[in-house]
Image: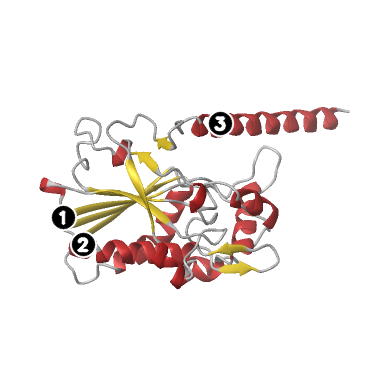
Amino acid sequence: MEEKVGMAKLWALFLVVVVLAGSAQAAADRNVSRGGMRRLAGAPGVPVPITVLTSAVAMGAVCMDGTPPAYHMDSGYGAGKNRWIVHLEGGSWCESVGSCLYRKASRLGSSNLMNRQMYFGGILSSSPTENPDFFSWNRVMIRYCDGASFAGEGYDPRSGLFSRGQRIFNAVIQHLLSMGMSSADQVLLSGSSAGALAVVLHCDQFGGFFAGRGTTVKCLADAGFFLDAVNVAGWHTLRTYFGGVVATHGVAQNLPRSCTSHLDATSVR
């Protein structure tokens, strides 16, 4: 009887977490105005238009539904004219074909459904008061539409799902390099949540794009540290979940060998 009561409490706690997560997502969705512009928390200034990188399709760099990747950019000026911050958008993951099909029909899986304008805030803000260190830099937000922290590689013909996050990262970064980022004095790769995990996965590669150029390269992973720990129910929830992400999106081939040589990337032990 006591065991049943204990499990009931655990399931109640789980449901509370799910409800809170849904509330947080609903709050984020309310940041989209009627004019089709997404407003980041505390964002001032004017909206930044979207750029859909149609040329990336030829490289196979596409969102989950096959549409081109996209980004928003606010050009730098003054002391920041030759400095760049590239921010990788966050937005959780999908760990199965079913959850990815659901995601595919949202802005996190299709550039057709993304807001055409976005207000920049925080580290991307154009306000000297809010963002004194980076307000005049070239500030870029790369939109997240692959479901696996810009690291997947694959295609499922049965569901029509593309897993091309690694190609999206390569294509957009190469495009930004051609726009002047290759001669930058300083560059910063940043991201939050799933975007922060993408920063961890891509920091070394990003630095490699500037090898021999004399550019100062740094990476900032904000809120992207996910512990492989036993939860209150005694389960390795995150290990199982990320194992599903890796298996569904073919991420293993793009993970650092220095890590995967110690543990199978899809292990749920």
Q: Name the amino acid type tagged 1.
A: Asn
Of labels 3 and 2, earlier in sequence is: 3
Residue at 58%, 69% in the rendered image: 154
Q: Name the amino acid type tagged 2.
A: Gly
Disc 1 designates what residue?
82
Direction front: furthest residue: 35
Q: Determine the CA span between mark 3 and mark 2.
A: 38 Å
Quadrant location, the C terminus: bottom right
> How would you rate the neighbour count of disc 2 (Cα within 10 Å): few for under 14, some for 14-19, many for 20 or more?
some
Of labels 2 and 1, earlier in sequence is: 1
> How would you rate the neighbour count of disc 1 (Cα within 10 Å): few for under 14, some for 14-19, many for 20 or more?
many
Asked if residue 173 lies left or right of residue 82, the reply is: right
Asked if residue 121 lies left or right of residue 236, the reply is: left
Q: Are marks 2 and 1 in contact (CB under 8 Å)?
A: yes
Of labels 1 and 3, earlier in sequence is: 3
> How would you rate the neighbour count of disc 3 (Cα within 10 Å): few for under 14, some for 14-19, many for 20 or more?
few
- Residue 72 in the image: state x and y as whole percent: 34, 49
Q: Determine the CA span between mark 2 and mark 1.
A: 8 Å
Q: Which mark is residue 219?
A: none
Q: Is residue 159 above or below residue 14?
A: below
Disc 2 designates what residue?
180
Q: Is residue 170 visible?
A: no
- Residue 157 in the image: state x and y as whole percent: 66, 69
Secondary structure at badge 2 equals loop
Residue at 49%, 33% in the rendered image: 28
The coloring applied to the image is secondary structure
Disc 3 designates what residue?
26
